[in-house]
Amino acid sequence: MTNEQVTEMRFARLYPLLEAKAVKKGRTREEVQQVVTWLTGYSAGELKELLETDTTYGAFFANAPRLHPERELIKGVVCGVRVEEIADPLMREIRRLDKLIDELAKGKPMEKILRQGEHTRAGRMAEGRKEASAGKRYEYDAVIHVLPEKDGAYVIFPWNIRDEFGRGRVKVHATFDGIPYDGSIVNMGLKNDDGSVCYILGMLKSIRTRLGKGAGDTVHLTIQARE
């Protein structure tokens, strides 16, 4: 199976396979969940919600709220490859989870599976950015983009949220032309013209209706991170 085939598979299809591998060897679903939440930063509730969606495996990792800074300590061979030598960043994260589940199935103690040690410098910097951005208010004009096949719409957040907040998914308080909305800035696999990751914020149909606006129209946004 190619890397692209792996990343395009549904998370809801692959997660049960991870569970089955561990449970077959006497581990629990709760332990699998603990490993996944440790690595990705998703809560148990968020995992449950994602299992009801068409989210791809690649998007699951790309939108991870906070990849654990100690994941760099995950090394060794899994699926015939050495994790730390995988060049593709997304596949490296995927194989890191495979490695953790493999260790779980082989009976390794949880305290050994969940790597512990000093945070990497990058991890400390990410935390600093998160704290510094917690009260920052973003204000700008954005064009409405629509997804006709899903009757949905979104606006682009023109900053890199990993640089701004140190994570790949951010819950925010927002206003569209003064109408309040609580949602999340995420990446859904879209790219900017220069090839960089494009982060978006969904715009409810009810808000578009109230404003009388649609595809191509401009809205004034204010955005601030929330817990």
Image (cartoon, helix red, strand yellow):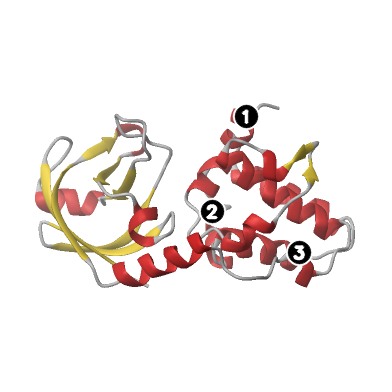
Identity, as a three-letter code, of the amino acid under mark 2? Leu
Element at label 2: helix
Instruction: Provide residue 50's location: percent of width, then percent of height.
Output: 54, 53
| Nearest to viewer (mark 1 / mark 3) | 3
Instruction: Assign the N terminus to one quadrant of the image.
Output: top right
Element at label 1: helix
Q: Which mark is residue 113?
A: 3
Camera-side residue of 197 and 185 = 197
- Give neighbour class at mark 3: few <14, some 14-19, many 20+ (Cα, 10 Å): some
Residue under label 1: 5
Rendered position, 223 above or below 79: below
Residue under label 2: 50
| Nearest to viewer (mark 2 / mark 1) | 1
Q: Is residue 36 left or right of residue 195?
A: right
Identity, as a three-letter code, of the amino acid under mark 3? Ile
Residue sitting at 26 percent across and 37 percent down?
146
Instruction: Provide residue 173's location: percent of width, then percent of height.
Output: 26, 66
- Give neighbour class at mark 1: few <14, some 14-19, many 20+ (Cα, 10 Å): few
Identity, as a three-letter code, of the amino acid under mark 1? Gln
Q: CA distance from mark 2 to mark 3?
A: 24 Å
Residue sitting at 43 percent across and 38 percent down?
189
